[in-house]
Amino acid sequence: MGNWNSPAALPEGMLAQLYWHSHPHLLSSKKTNAWVLASDLTKMMATQFDCQYCTTSLLGKKYVLKDDNPYCVSCYDRIFSNYCEKCKDPIESDSKDLCYKGRHWHEGCFKCSKCNYSLVEKPFAAKDERLLCTECYSNECSSKCFHCKRTIMPGSRKMEFKGNYWHETCFVCEHCRQPIGTKPLISKESGNYCVPCFEKEFAQYCNFCKKVITSGGITFRDQLWHRECFLCSGCRKELCEEEFMSRDDYPFCLDCYTHLYAKRCAACTKPITGLRGAKFICFQDRQWHSECFNCGKCSTSLVP
């Protein structure tokens, strides 16, 4: 009968049957989908089928292929297993390995770091290397609506204005209550307003261009001007940062006023503007600077 421990001595049918139990994945041909011939199996079993690392025979045992090399389960787990981020134990070959950005977890360890709720097949987010379910992430990291004080959930649209955040549906005009969105707005202490409502409720109009003054502005003779509209009535330069004089309720820069309207000193012939409280003397329809009103013979001041 022969030695049953020698593969060459086994009947071909029995050899195929024994080899199928040990290597079912090797008995199917991709090209022909036909069973490997018993004679070929004899040649394959005649070659040693050992663990690539510890050289223990793998015949009749479970093994794992890595880069086309067989390893016993023990060696494979020891050499190639990833370590779980949470429990720090190896993730063995018979366990599911969940991976996120190069980090690994056991299936039972893949949980929200705050509420411990399983994240397997659930949406989650990462914050400072921690995994969080969407609810915990929202409560801990998401912005709060300035109006309703509720969390603005990730993925929902939020509006930002002056360092605060709103739900899109909470960011509305204080008057008409319609969402402002990205439309122009004007802010007051009482709230935010769309431009039409602000103009209807609060607007003041420039005395020059007749358009709405939304902020700032200059008051002159109880009337309002845009800063850029408050101009010299002579040369048309802006007066918002300049000293100016008025004539018949019209503003003039000092140069234009001096040239057009200022009286001349009877002594020095320079203009008398009266700026900054400067005093002048009027006598017989003539004017003098106070420092110029002197005796024509001895130059003694005649100012009383």
Image (cartoon, rainbow, N blue to C red):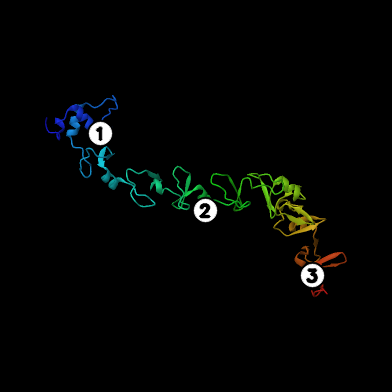
Residue labelled with disc 2: 140
Q: Secondary structure at mark 3?
A: helix
**Quadrant of residue 243 within the rendered picture:** bottom right
Foreground: disc 3 or disc 1: 1
The front one of 106 and 193 is: 106
Q: CA distance from mark 2 to mark 1?
A: 55 Å
| 287 versus 57 height, above or below | below
Can residue 81 be spotted in the picture? yes
In the image, what residue type sits under mark 2? Glu
Can residue 211 be spotted in the picture? no
**Quadrant of residue 22 within the rendered picture:** top left
| 94 versus 237 height, above or below | above
- Location of the N terminus by quadrant is top left
Q: CA distance from mark 3 to mark 2?
A: 75 Å
In the image, what residue type sits under mark 3? Ser
- Residue lying at 27% horizontally and 32% vertically, measured from the top left: 24
Residue labelled with disc 1: 21
The disc, 2 or 1, on the residue closer to the chain's N-terminal end is: 1
Residue labelled with disc 3: 290
| 220 versus 293 height, above or below | above
Q: Residues within 10 Å of mark 1 (few under 14, many from 20)?
A: few
| 155 versus 31 height, above or below | below
Q: Secondary structure at mark 2?
A: helix
Q: Residues within 10 Å of mark 2 (few under 14, many from 20)?
A: few
In the image, what residue type sits under mark 1? His
* Image location (x, y in percent) of residue 304: 83, 75
Taking the image as shown, residue 178 lies to the left or right of residue 68, namely right
The front one of 258 and 237 is: 237
Foreground: disc 3 or disc 2: 2
Q: Secondary structure at mark 1?
A: helix
* Image location (x, y in percent) of residue 191: 68, 52
